[in-house]
Structure formats: structure tokens, C-alpha cells
Image (spheres, helix red, strand yellow):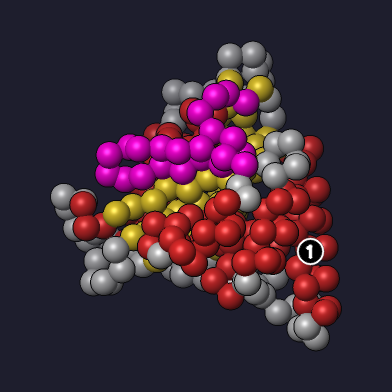
Amino acid sequence: MKIFVYLDESGSIHKNSSTKYFAVGGYFALERDRQKIISSYREITHEYKSKRNIKFSKEIKGRDMNSALKEKILTDLQSIESFYGIAKVFDKTKMRKEILNSNIFYNYAVRLIFDDCIFPLISFSKVNEPIEFILNLDNRSLALKDLFSLEEYLNIEYSKDNFSFRVTYLDSKINYSIQLADLIVNTFYNYFNNKHNVASVYDILILKKFRVSIFPGGKTFGRRYKIKI
């Protein structure tokens, strides 16, 4: 069985950054709904671009979308059965240790996404086959030497479990799934950083379709009960 996970980030992970928050997030879905999610996002954004004479090839970042577009996209996606939005938000002002190595911390952040936002929602008890998580990330800030470090790290961390990880790096400029992940993580990043900017978007969210976890402290909101796969 394959579960597809798409992640992006908002804020700055760098230790010298003055931003208060850093977030990693996006969404996960079962294989049967993967293309349906992509098609929905593509159709809505193409209609938006067409009305405004924007080239279809141009990427629209989550921070550049107006509230109406965000609401339309997220309302549509929430109707898809196995779509679940996720985010891990780090309050850097409350962390006891500073971030010395961005790549190591990012790997840790992704692990926490699984521990706090994905695994708690999935019922593994009746799954009799190995589960492969296909993890897709934006490649724009990735050094060549780091290409395989996350995949190796996750497979070692969860070596006792009946699942594996395959990490793929995609270009957000041409990949709709990563663009959607950017929209989701940017929405929750702004919920903490500047709530009034996304108030109308947050109001239309069906919280059982999302799970957000805060670090440090482990506080969560959104979905809390298991998904049968």
C-alpha cells in the first residue's frame, strides 16, 4: 500500500532569521485520490489564471493568492475522501536550543510531521501489507549532498515498523502537488504569524480534514480520530 505525502515549508529555518515561526506542512492522501486532488487544484488555478490573463505555466505562491481563491481550492479539496492537510508549526522563541544545522533540523521536523500529524490518524491494525510512504518535497533549497539524507534517516528511525519511505524532490514551479502543499502550510503559518490575514480562509476549513501540531509543547488541533485505510 502506498500513501502519498507532499510537504513544503513557510518561515525561515535559519538560526539568524528574525521570524518567530517556522512551519512544515502540506497534505497526505491514499493512492486512489492522488490524481483527483491534483486535477482539482489544477482546474481551479487554471480558471483563475485564465480570467486574469496569467500564463498557465506561472506558479502562484500561497502568499500571493487572494482569500477567495484559497477558499475555493480548500473547499473543493475537503470533499475528497482521503485528502488530509497537515502542519507542524515551530515557535522558535520558545525552543530551548537554537537551530545550528538547518538540514538536520529539517529532517527532525519532517519526522515530527509523521509522529504527530500522520501516524496518530492512521489505523494500522487491519493492514496486512507493507506500507510505503512516498514523500514528495520541494527541491528549491536542497543541496545535492542532502538528496538522500532524509530518506535514509526516516528508514532508520522507523526500521522496526512495517513501512518504508521513498523521498522524491519536485520543482514547485511545475508541480501542482507541491504548490498545494505550499498553500496549506502557508495558511497555517499565517494563522499563527498574522491571523487576520487568513481569518476568512480558516473559517471555511473542516477541521476533521486537517491536523496541526505545535512545537514545543505538543498541542494539537484538528482531527483526532483514526482513518481506516
On the image, which quarter does residue 156 sit in? top left
Residue 181's spot in the image, x, y percent?
Answer: 59, 57
Q: Nearer the viewer, residue 123 or 4?
A: 123
Pointer 1 residue = 44
- Is residue 65 located in the magenta-colored stretch of the structure? no
Q: Farthest residue in the bottom direction?
A: 53
Q: Amino acid at mark 1?
A: Ile
* Apparent side of residue 71 relative to residue 225 in the rendered image (left or right): right
Q: Which residues are magenta?
A: 206-227
Q: Farthest residue in the left direction?
A: 96
Q: Does residue 8 appear in this view?
A: no
Q: Nearer the viewer, residue 70 or 182?
A: 70
Q: Does residue 167 appear in this view?
A: yes
* Apparent side of residue 74 relative to residue 39 in the rendered image (left or right): left
Q: Nearer the viewer, residue 203 or 101?
A: 203
Position of the C terminus by quadrant: top right
Residue 2's spot in the image, x, y percent?
Answer: 68, 35
Q: Residues within 10 Å of mark 1 (few under 14, many from 20)?
A: some
Residue 50's spot in the image, x, y percent?
Answer: 83, 78
Q: Is residue 173 above or below residue 106?
A: below
| Residue drawn where x is 44% and y is 31% of the image | 158
| Residue drawn where x is 48% and y is 48% of the image | 87
| Residue drawn where x is 58% and y is 75% of the image | 64
Q: Is residue 90 above or below residue 118?
A: below
Q: Nearer the viewer, residue 97 or 189?
A: 189
Q: Is residue 88 above or below residue 11?
A: above
On the image, which quarter does residue 111 sit in? top left
Position of the N terminus by quadrant: top right
* Apparent side of residue 140 relative to residue 71 in the rendered image (left or right): left
* Mark 1 secondary-structure assignment: helix
- Is residue 219 located in the magenta-colored stretch of the structure? yes
Residue 18's spot in the image, x, y percent?
Answer: 26, 71
